[in-house]
Amino acid sequence: MNLEDLQFAQRYPFSGTARKIVAETGLNLQDVSEAVTERAQKMILASAKQQKYDPQIGNYEELLQNEVLAFPVAKILLSIIAKPELYSKFANMFSKSAFVSLQSESDETLCDIAKDLGIIIKFSGNPEEFAEIGMLQYLSADFREDFMKLANQRLEKGRIILSKNEFVRFLSQAIYKKIFSSMPADTKQIPNSLKTIANSLSKQAFSESFQAFNAKLSGNIKADAFPPCISELYAKMLSGANLSHTERFTLASFLVSAGMGTEQIIAIFKNAPNFNEKISRYQIERIAGSGNKTNYAPASCAKMKSYKLCIRNGELCGNVKHPMQFYRSRAFPRRKAQ
């Protein structure tokens, strides 16, 4: 392991070079060093909070090696936590980091990384027509940005012609899919020490993202007074989970009734992986009763049970028949007493 290989593996921890380094060090999950588990936890928490991850290690070989080893350990911890929304955030963080690094790599290195990812390309070297990729392989990247969708690409004889910048974007999306699809890993033989760390991490990852958004709430909205069913949906949405239409409608109608404004609700829904502001705004305004449209009341406890969204069959809520009844009794206890 030379310094150059360690630096490359740290930039691209999903690469064959990184896997080779992990194999050569003989990483043993039964005896992972504290330094490695600490780095793995920092990776996970940074991704959960959707922060930029830039450890600034420099040329210190031991620190570089710890960083490379921390990546598979982080994936094990995430697999124990078993929250797909955290897998997505983790993969997204490294995809963005790789995109920045890829922009300054040589053409040869870009082609090597593509090969490592199993991407078959025809390389030209011309920055405007840098690479050709098969249409099906391009579609597998599943881009969300309009400018990268198939309809906006140059298509010739079933192959997509990409500029160098577009090719780098394609690679970064392929990296996201590679990391995301590698989880969950097998956790059958995982030591209890890592399970304990994962349990603590799970609480931190969700509570910090929850509290970070709550700090932005204005007016009299009190998220800590939400009933368990709504609190669950709220936390899922903030963490980037892909809620069903029923779950989104239920959450939006409750937030509207609680007095949250349209812009705040849209800000929450922006965390959804397939967020579309135009559609979300239309639906939320319709629920809120903007203009002459109908105002939709939030679901009752009976309906929440029929939707299978009630937590533990309501045993946590006491004798209430509606989520709003639960919320008002805890958010405004003085009003209840009066």
Image (cartoon, grey):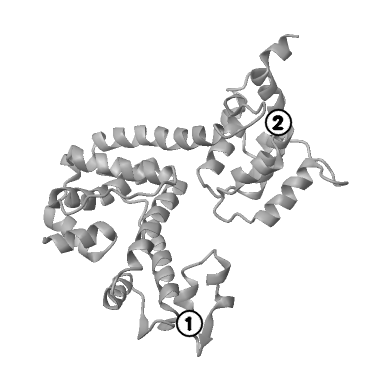
Quadrant that contains the N terminus: bottom left
> Residue 6: x, y in percent?
18, 59
Left or right: residue 299 compared with residue 7: right
Q: 232 or 164: nearer the eye?
A: 164
> Splitting the image into 4 quarters, where does residue 102 fall?
bottom left
Label 1 crowd bin: few (<14), some (14–19), many (20+), radius 10 Å: many
Front residue of 35 and 190: 35
Which numbered disc covers residue 121? none
Q: Is residue 13 visible?
A: no
Could you tell me which residue is drawn at 56 percent across and 29 percent down? 312
Amino acid residing under circle 1: Ile
Query: Looking at numbered disc 2 in the image, what kind of residue is underneath it?
Result: Ala
Q: Quadrant of the C terminus?
A: top right
Residue drawn at x 19%, y 48% is: 66
- Res. 4 in view: yes
Residue bearing mark 1: 160
| SS assignment at label 2 | helix
- What residue does disc 2 label? 258
